[in-house]
């Protein structure tokens, strides 16, 4: 059986042995020198052996030795195995158990008693005054107590939910309700207040039956400020819902209603007017029957109104606006407008192509500008000059606007200033203007001269690499291949293919 040791306690002696000769396995070894490093301890939960803390072992008799363990050696509760192996002797193994101090003192030393603390009885958690599932009552007037002197249980201060109270023959301490509260209730209109409440309920039920009910409801798939699309609308009649009211019940337009002006079965689309403040998305909606109370708040653009037999609340237009129209010259104002249009058409027939009135007869061959010359003109000539201009003998100061058309004739010669201006623009284009290098693309066969020069400069300036199969021209940063070409060499002819785009 194991040797019991006290947890974390010094000066605890245990025997080691028998130590017998390692050659014959029989002769007792009585003069061994055993150091603390020859004694190895295994403690519960350890994955390695530890040397005995200090002190070796001393011979007792016949190959039996003893060693003294200290607090460090016994600092782990549980099983402990003591191994000892010395040169010249076979190894030994000693089983020990380290007990908690209170358990060791109670079971081994007999100097203490084991603690017993009942936290549960029969699976029921216990409190200070519990025994099992029953409550230990005590004398007193508090909760869960009885007065042992009177033999009565005081119920005051206890909530009696579910309590069974026997028949009450006499009720004391209770005042009949005849005071202010009773007066405030007043006398019922009918047989009782319950009868009055029942009558009100009947009236509200009757009101509910008179209110319009929703015809259909659903969730839109999509829409706009004036349309709602719902594939669940399977009605096959065009304008099936026309004249009813669409009420949005979620989203930005929630609570708003609009008059339905059309329904398209093929696309399941409801059209309304006027437009909602925000476009309809996947909003929920209801369709209600039109009523005077609802239509009074809507703009009825495109609404279908049935034949009006009697119009009330409408005043005939006989006031100021009517007077301002005046009496028509002909049968009606429309007839007067038609006559005016006929006159303007006749006026156009008597005008020239330039819009200038000329004499009757032939419309061509008239000189419109006298020989004294045409003065300064500040207005725009919006038409075209299709005839020829013989010559301009005077100087044209400047043309500040753009010439939108083409000069199809030849320009005889440029004056000195004009030549200088053209030369300056060419020099500026070559020496001052800058051009970005061509990007990542395949050079075209027919491109501008500027782009052709750009490709040559890019090939001269930028990074170029060549492998056995590919020539690569990089961008300005030297990180991306913008143009490339295949290359080959059969030891007789080196061939570079046409430059194409990178990378």
Image (cartoon, rainbow, N blue to C red):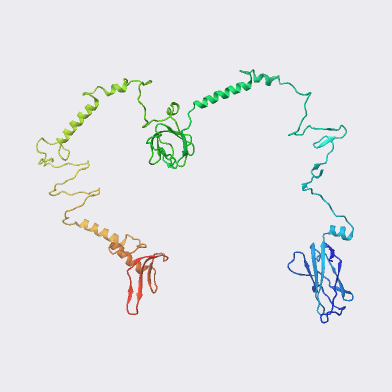
Tell me if residue 39 comes above or below residue 421 in the rendering. below
328 vs 212, nearest the viewer? 212
Quadrant of image for the C terminus: bottom left
Q: Residue 479, percent across and down?
A: 42, 65
Answer left or right for 419 relative to 241: left
Q: Is residue 86 above or below residue 323?
A: below
Q: Quadrant of residue 114?
A: bottom right
Left/right of residue 90 with respect to residue 408 in the rendered view: right
Is the residue 401 above or below the residue 351 in the image?
below
- The total of numbered circles placed on residues is 0
- Left/right of residue 351 with respect to residue 76 in the rendered view: left
Tell me the quarter of the picture where residue 278 sits.
top left
Q: Residue at x 84, y 76 (%)?
A: 19
Q: Position of residue 6 (x, y in %)?
A: 84, 62
Evaluate whether residue 236 shows in this view: yes
In the picture as drawn, the residue positioned furthest to the bottom comes out as 23
Image location (x, y in percent) of residue 337: 22, 29
């Amino acid at each position: 059986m194991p040797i019991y040791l006290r947890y974390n306690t010094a000066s605890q002696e245990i025997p080691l042995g028998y130590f017998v000769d390692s050659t014959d396995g029989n002769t007792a070894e009585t003069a061994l020198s055993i150091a603390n490093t020859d004694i190895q301890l295994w403690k519960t939960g350890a994955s390695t052996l530890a040397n005995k803390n200090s002190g070796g072992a001393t011979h007792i008799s016949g190959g039996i030795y003893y060693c003294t363990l200290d607090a460090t050696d016994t600092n782990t509760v549980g099983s402990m195995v003591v191994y000892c192996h010395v040169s010249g002797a076979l190894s030994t193994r000693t089983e020990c158990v380290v007990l908690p101090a209170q358990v060791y003192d109670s079971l081994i030393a007999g100097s203490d008693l084991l603690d017993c603390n009942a936290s549960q009885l029969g699976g029921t958690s216990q409190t200070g005054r519990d025994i099992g599932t029953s409550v230990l009552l005590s004398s007193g007037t508090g909760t869960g107590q009885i007065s042992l002197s009177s033999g009565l249980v005081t119920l005051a201060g206890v909530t009696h939910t579910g309590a069974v109270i026997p028949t009450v023959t006499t009720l004391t301490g209770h005042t009949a309700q005849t005071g202010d509260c009773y007066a405030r209730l007043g006398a019922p209109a009918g047989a009782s207040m319950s009868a009055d409440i029942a009558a009100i309920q009947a009236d509200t039920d009757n009101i509910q039956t008179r209110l319009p009910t929703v015809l259909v409801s659903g969730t839109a798939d999509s829409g706009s400020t004036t349309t709602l699309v719902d594939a669940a609308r399977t009605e096959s009649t065009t304008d099936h819902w026309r004249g009813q009211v669409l009420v949005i019940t979620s989203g930005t337009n929630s609570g708003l209603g609009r008059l339905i002006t059309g329904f398209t079965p093929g696309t399941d689309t409801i059209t309304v007017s006027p437009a909602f403040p925000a476009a309809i998305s996947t909003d929920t909606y209801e369709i209600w029957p039109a009523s005077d109370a609802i239509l009074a708040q809507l703009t009825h653009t495109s609404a279908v109104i049935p034949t009006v037999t009697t119009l009330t609340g409408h005043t005939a237009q006989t006031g100021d606006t009517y007077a301002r129209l005046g009496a028509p010259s002909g049968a009606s104002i429309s007839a007067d407008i038609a006559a005016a249009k006929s006159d303007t058409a006749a006026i156009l027939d008597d005008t020239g192509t330039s819009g200038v009135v000329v004499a009757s007869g032939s419309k061509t061959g008239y000189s419109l500008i006298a020989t004294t010359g045409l003065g300064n003109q500040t207005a725009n000539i919006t038409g075209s000059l299709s005839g020829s201009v013989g010559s301009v003998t005077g100087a044209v100061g400047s043309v500040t606007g753009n010439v939108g058309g083409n000069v199809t004739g030849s320009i005889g010669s440029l004056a000195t200033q004009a030549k200088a201006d053209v030369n300056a623009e060419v020099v500026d284009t070559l020496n001052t203007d800058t051009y970005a290098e061509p990007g990542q693309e395949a050079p075209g066969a027919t491109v501008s001269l500027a782009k052709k020069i750009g490709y040559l400069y890019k090939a001269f300036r930028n990074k170029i690499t060549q492998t056995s199969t590919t020539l690569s021209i990089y961008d300005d940063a030297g990180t991306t291949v913008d143009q490339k070409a295949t290359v080959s060499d059969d030891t007789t002819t080196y061939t570079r293919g046409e430059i194409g785009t990178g990378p």
